[in-house]
Structure formats: C-alpha cells, structure tokens
Image (cartoon, grey):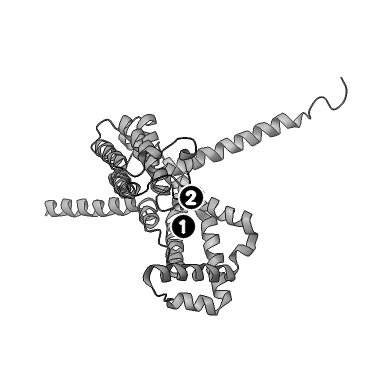
Amino acid sequence: MRPGLVGNKGEPALAERSGAFVRIRLSRAAQQLFQFGREETPGEAWRGRLFESFLLIYAVYWAWEWGLFIAQIPAVVVPQGIARELDISFLMGGRLGLANAAIITLCALSALFKRGARLSLPLLVALLHLQYVARHSLGKVAHGSQYVGIGLLMLAVAAWCMPSPGARRRFTLGATQFFMGAGYMCAALSKLIAKGPSWADGQHLWLWIGEKSVDQLSNLGHAELNALQRLCLEHRWLATAFLAGGLLTELSGFLLWSPKTRAGATLALIGLHLGVFWTMDILFDTYIYQLLLVGLPWPRWIDGARGRWLNGQRASAAT
C-alpha cells in the first residue's frame, strides 16, 4: 500500500478525545441550563408558572394589537418571513386578523388552564407568527416581540417532548435562556462582521441621535435632547464608550447560560437596554421584563423566604 493512504495512528485517538470533550462540554452546558436530574423546588415551580403566564399574556396582547393594525392595511407591501412563500393577502384590510386574534386567545386560555396544550400551543405559535408577518408587511419590522416568540416556541416544544409539568417548565426556561444569550451574541457579531471594531465609533451614535431627533420632530413638532444625549454629542469619547460598552455586553450574552453568571449578565443587559433608551429613545421594555423573569435568582429568593417563614411558624408552634 502506498504511503499516505493510511492516516496517522494517532488520528483516531485524537478524534475520539475531541468528540468526548465536545460531548462533556455539551452535557455540562445542558445540565447548567436545564438541571433535569434535580427535584424542582417551590420557587422554581412558581417562577416557571409565572413565566408561562407572561408568555401567554403577551401572545394575546400582541395578537389583538396586530389584528387591529392588520385591519387597516389594504395590501401586502413587503412580504416578511413566511409571507415570502405564503400569500397572506387574505388577511389584509378586513376582520380576519381579529378572528385570528380570537383563536389565539382561545389557544392561550387552553394552555393556561392545562387543557389540550399539546394541540393549542403549536397552533398558537403558528397563528401568532402569521399575525406577526401580516402586521409587518409594510416593510419595517419591530424587534420587541422576538424573545417572547422564542419562549412560546419552546413552550410548544416542551408540551410535546417533556414528560412532566416540572420538566416542561425547566425546558421552556432553559431553552429560552439559551436562545436569548445566543441572540445577544449574534447581534454583536453581526455588528462586528458589518463594520468591525469601528462600529463603536462615537460618530455613529451622533448619527443615530440625529435620526431619532428627526422622528421626534415629525411626530411631536419639536425635538428636545436629554442631558445624556447632549453630553454624548459634545464628547466623542463618551459616545464611543457607550457603544463599546454595549457591544461588549451583547458579546457576553453567553453568560446567561450559567447560573453563576446569569444574574450579573442580566443586570448588564438591562443596563444596555436602558442606555439605548436614554441615548436613542428606543425602549425594548418587553426584553427588560423577560430578562427580569428568566435571569434573576427568583427561586432562591422565594425558597429562602419560604424557609424563613416555615421556621418562624415552627418556632411559634413550639412556644
């Protein structure tokens, strides 16, 4: 046999070690996110139910808000997402968007009261996505609902794949934490791919502040900058620091995947959104609410408070 046709004897062992390393890392990451092997605490169950309710309430809210808007749109201008493959013009300019919202509401109530969730949740996700692409068929796409949509999709997957209510809650929460962290990282990477480190140049923030001032002028008839915006326009280094800090915060989205770093990453990301609001008048309030729910250690706080209350009750009974 000619030399070179057989690989080095060390290659299979190296590939095996590499595969084992990847499997171990994935297993550890899954354990950190889901922790299926541990019994669910009352605090975890409470947070899980609250998060499910949060997702379903927002689904109903947006279904009706978008349905009312769809009724005013006579035609599809720019097809978005699935609308590029599916003709959704039948929804436009009539009451079908409101009928769709009514069906979504019934699906949400079914899931909320644990009646037929295996069927109602996938139907809710499909109909809400249809409502979303119809609402944004004018061309401008809002980003405030994406993470709620991810949470709803994970809730639907959990209803089919997880064997118990506790496992469903853990899967929904852990998978949402994973995709939220990945979403922030991808947002930062897309900026770096487009412009490189120069994306953080303070002059870009000047441009965005100017554009938002034009929007404010057209909506209100006047434009007024706040103190932070004026400081950023006066000091390029400060504007650059804001953009660089925001970029680094987005890049740290993977810290949402670990319980040890999740709370700190959550507070940093909330700070990022508040900074965007104060400098560019863009408020992703739903992102902030969802971060507060999925990122802070509510189960530990609830279980701690519950334990102290139970100890107090026992002490009172003993006396």
Residue 235, placed above or below residue 198: below
Q: Nearer the viewer, residue 146 or 29?
A: 146
Q: Which residue is mark 1?
A: 265
Q: CA distance from mark 1 to mark 2?
A: 9 Å
* Label whose residue precedes the other's in the sequence (1 or 2): 2
Crowd rating for badge 2 (residues with CA inside 10 Å; few <14, some 14–19, many 20+) = many
Spot the residue most to the right: 2
- Image mark count: 2
Quarter of the rendering occupied by the N terminus: top right
Mark 1–mark 2 contact, CB under 8 Å?
Answer: yes
Position of 20 with respect to 295 (left or right) is: right
Residue 14, placed above or below residue 261: above
| Residue 171 is at least partly visible in this image | no
As drawn, the label of residue 181 is 2
Residue visible at 34% across and 33% down in the picture = 123
Residue 69 x %, y %: 33, 50
| SS of the residue under disc 2 | helix
Residue visible at 53% across and 39% down in the picture = 26
Q: Nearer the viewer, residue 185 or 262?
A: 185
| Residue 96 is at least partly visible in this image | yes
Q: Nearer the viewer, mark 1 or mark 2?
A: 2
